[in-house]
Image (cartoon, coloured by chain):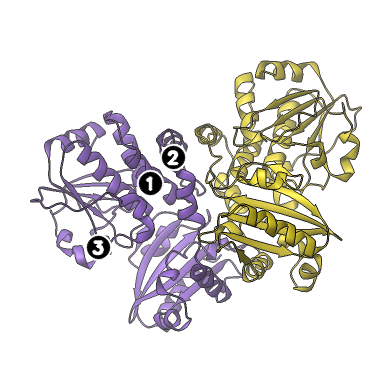
Chain colours: A yellow, B purple
Amino acid sequence: MTFAEIGAFFEQHDNYTILTHKSPDGDTLGAGFGLWGYLTAMGKKANVLNGDGFPERYSFMYKGYAPEEFQEQCVIAVDIADPNLLGHSLAQYQQPGRIDLCIDHHISNKYYAKQSYVDGASSAACLILYQLFKELGRPISDQVALCLYTGIATDTGCFKYENTTPAAHIAAAELMQYDFPYAKINRLMFDIRSKGRLAAEHFVEANMEFFAGDKCAMIVLTTETMENCGIRQEEFDGLASIPLTMEGVELGITVKQRHENVYKLSVRTTERIDASAFCRQFGGGGHIRAAGCEITGTLEETRSRILAAVEALEL
Amino acid sequence: MTFAEIGAFFEQHDNYTILTHKSPDGDTLGAGFGLWGYLTAMGKKANVLNGDGFPERYSFMYKGYAPEEFQEQCVIAVDIADPNLLGHSLAQYQQPGRIDLCIDHHISNKYYAKQSYVDGASSAACLILYQLFKELGRPISDQVALCLYTGIATDTGCFKYENTTPAAHIAAAELMQYDFPYAKINRLMFDIRSKGRLAAEHFVEANMEFFAGDKCAMIVLTTETMENCGIRQEEFDGLASIPLTMEGVELGITVKQRHENVYKLSVRTTERIDASAFCRQFGGGGHIRAAGCEITGTLEETRSRILAAVEALEL
């Protein structure tokens, strides 16, 4: 699809459901609420859905949003590579043909929607939306600008990671002309830690394990550990970037128990390793430097499967 | 001075000494070595000096640099607000009339040089140099681009802080077209921690003190503490951003003993407090969100002077 075709699509339809991915991050929510603000400014009706609900820490993006009652006519997925990522409570949208349009930036996109706009080289789904909205020419609100900026900033680690493109910086320069507190948002997204969060960081950092001559660092969090260490469960969210901060580490793995015998892996890598390929071995995927997957088995089995895959890399 | 006048100045002079500030950071070194690369590409001779020497962690900026023997004709200071910041070993340049040109972005600049180009609204000295080089039209090398990018990235906290301007993002977008490993540099500058550094972070985080209803967080590091905790001294460098990462904190103060009865303060603030004004009370200065000063006195005296100043803010 071209941007002009997406523009025509927006004009022709109404009563939109916008889907965002489970374990929502700044990019899927920025794209969801940015698109919501854009469509409602066009006079359309739209709702944004998330299988896990909207986390409080992103509330600055969805303030003013309230779901509307209407007969859904059209479903758009943003930043969702695979319908699996919708989660159980949105399982009805996983059936073939349920999603009309997908806008995404994951190279691993499964092309499950009737129509797709996928740019695997784009830093963020929000960057695609910004370029789309700019080309379509309709003015965007400060709140839409805030959503898009947040998605670009969060998916690039505040313009730090390899996936940061010149286009991402140019979009940021242009979006900053709108009125929103970017420094405050960045502080909230990247810096601020509660005392509980600090305790969680210290806990996982103190228990980090090193393999492959210290080139691989791994954090393992079982439900039992998280429940017994006196730190609130949610303080253990989003710690996946920690292993790669250790000097010499090229592969950072964070393993978190989701259910009995189900472990979620978050993998982060330097330029030497393809995180997406690493996770594909276990049926997952994502980006070249940040990817994820789930392993089913006991903790012992999970560990040995991971360590075998690490060994096979010959770091 | 206009950029054209600085260009004429570069043409007219030779045998440059480029001065950078003590406790060097990415911006002063990026500007120093960026200017060195630019001037030597013009066929000029130049040396870069620093009162504390060039730290190993910035060696990617000065690889290929070796000081030359020549009769100094011209002295340029980059990113130096006050000749005090040259440090003891460059004290000969503190005398009036010794510095020909100053290029700086500190609002607190003392206009000590014969000619000055100061833009207090610029994100970094390296951003000023980038805009200067761009206007002058002479091509820059990948290595100069690397130096300038590093200075802009480090002084804005990788485009995170309030001092990040659209111009900083545009410069980054343009500089990224050159060939240098920006993601690797960002990882080195912002993320990577040795095991010793991690220990230092845990140490200061565990000993952080909170005042003014948790709106002020303070780290105090005496020589004795640093020597007795089993962590190498240099691991305690650059920890000044930590207090402000704590939820609710608006004023972060890091106090480090330099000599007997001499304490160096690094102050970081959110939008509610002027860090530069806070430090001016003690004869220091800097930027609105990041500033510094020295207090002479015993630890007790230093603490009570700081706490009185914190109390006066009525946070």
Give the CA distance from mark 3 to mark 2.
28 Å
Q: Residue at x 82, y 48 (%)?
A: A52
Query: Which structural element holds mark 2?
Result: helix
Q: Which of label 3 and label 1 is nearer to you?
A: 3
Residue at image mark 3: B51
Q: Residue at x 10, y 51 (%)?
A: B72
> Is disc 3 in contact with disc 2, using a CB cutoff of under 8 Å?
no
The lab-note entry on whether marks 3 and 2 share a chain reads yes
Which picture quadrant has residue B266? bottom left
Query: Which structural element holds mark 3?
Result: loop
Specify few, some or many for label 3: CA neighbours under 10 Å numbering under 14, 14-19, or 20 or more. Answer: some
> Is disc 2 in contact with disc 1, using a CB cutoff of under 8 Å?
yes
Specify few, some or many for label 1: CA neighbours under 10 Å numbering under 14, 14-19, or 20 or more. Answer: many
**Residue B173 horizontal/vertical position (percent):** 46, 34
Give the CA distance from mark 3 to mark 1.
21 Å
Residue at image mark 1: B124
Residue type, numbered disc 1: Ala
**Residue A311 horizontal/vertical position (percent):** 64, 57
**Up-down: is B287 above or below A85?**
below
| Whether residue A293 can be seen here | yes
Q: Residue at x 24, y 63 (%)?
A: B51
Marks 3 and 2, the one that precedes in the sequence: 3
Give the CA distance from mark 2 to mark 1.
8 Å
Residue A31's disc is none
**Up-down: is B34 above or below A255?**
above
| Whether residue B156 can be seen here | no
Residue at image mark 2: B168
Q: Locate the C terminus of chain A and report the quarter of the image it occupies.
A: bottom right
